[in-house]
Amino acid sequence: MSKTIVLKLGGSVITEKQNPGVIHTTRLQAIAETIAHHRDLPLIIVHGAGSCGHPEAHQYRIPDGVGRENAAGIGETHRAVAGLNSTVVSILRDAGIDAVGVHPLCGSFAEEGRLISFETRQLAMMADLGIVPVLHGDVVMDRKRGGCIISGDQLVLRIAEGVRAERVGLATDVAGVLSEGEVVRMMTRSTADAVDLGDSEKMDVTGGMRGKVQELLALADTGIMSSIFHIERLGDFLAGDDHGGTEIVMEQL
């Protein structure tokens, strides 16, 4: 297992999900400063699309599949998420982080909404050199559907598996997975069934909290633990301290 950390910044953290195209630049600057304090860590960042991509994907019905009648949605959706990615990378670089944007559309292939071709070796090499690759939820070509949305959460799963990440963290706008208003501190595949994960109240074509937990449970099955925590606890997570959130771990037999 490598020392690499995979960090996901939720779309609701870096954009106003109810206001299409509005980016939380002030919050991103604070996030960048926190990451800069831990610049010695080999890091790969994935961010959600938030309000930069979900509206376009919904408008062009990308989740229903892509044909000639709605193929323009691929370009429009990618334009929106790539623009957000450019802003994220720019703010990270302004904080002294050697960040580089990586677009999944350019080198991925899916079938029925799941990645079947996705390279991670270059990401591991970048992280080892002190470069921070920054990926994002994106639209990619799909062998059966024509095109599909690949969420940042699915990317986290594939990247963490591919580089054998030491730690994985999802920074969100909630304190963790909640049950009756309280944070579920530890979750396994068997205990997850007892938690009502609900659905996002905001427009989200990638599954909201339920989608996150499903991907992270699959990651736990491979032996890689992950964390879901509030963005304000990012510094604690990067430092390896208690972040007050949810740990998703492998089932103990």
Image (cartoon, grey):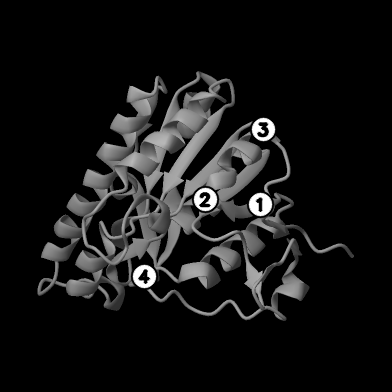
Nearest the eye: 244 or 52:
244
| Amino acid type indicated by mark 1 | Ser
Vertical arrangement, residue 61 with respect to residue 175, above or below? below
Secondary structure state at the residue bearing disc 3: helix
Please report whichever mark, 2 or 4, sits nearer to the chain's N-terminal start.
2
Mark 3, mark 4: which one is toward the viewer? 3
Q: Where does label 1 land, which residue?
A: 226
Whole-number angstrom distance, CA of label 2 to CA of label 1: 10 Å
Whole-number angstrom distance, CA of label 1 to CA of label 3: 15 Å
Please report whichever mark, 2 or 1, sits nearer to the chain's N-terminal start.
2
Q: Residue at x 28, y 65 (%)?
A: 54
Residue 169 in picture, x, y percent from top left: 59, 47
Please report whichever mark, 1 or 4, sits nearer to the chain's N-terminal start.
4
Residue 246 in picture, x, y percent from top left: 68, 58
Whole-number angstrom distance, CA of label 1 to CA of label 4: 22 Å
Q: Where does label 3 land, which residue?
A: 239
Q: Residue at x 25, y 56 (%)?
A: 52
Whole-number angstrom distance, CA of label 3 to CA of label 4: 31 Å
Mark 3–mark 4 contact, CB under 8 Å?
no
Q: Is residue 115 left or right of residue 190?
A: left
Q: Residues within 10 Å of mark 2 (few under 14, many from 20)?
A: many
Whole-number angstrom distance, CA of label 2 to CA of label 4: 17 Å
Residue 214 in picture, x, y percent from top left: 59, 68
Please report whichever mark, 1 or 3, sits nearer to the chain's N-terminal start.
1
Residue 69 in picture, x, y percent from top left: 10, 75
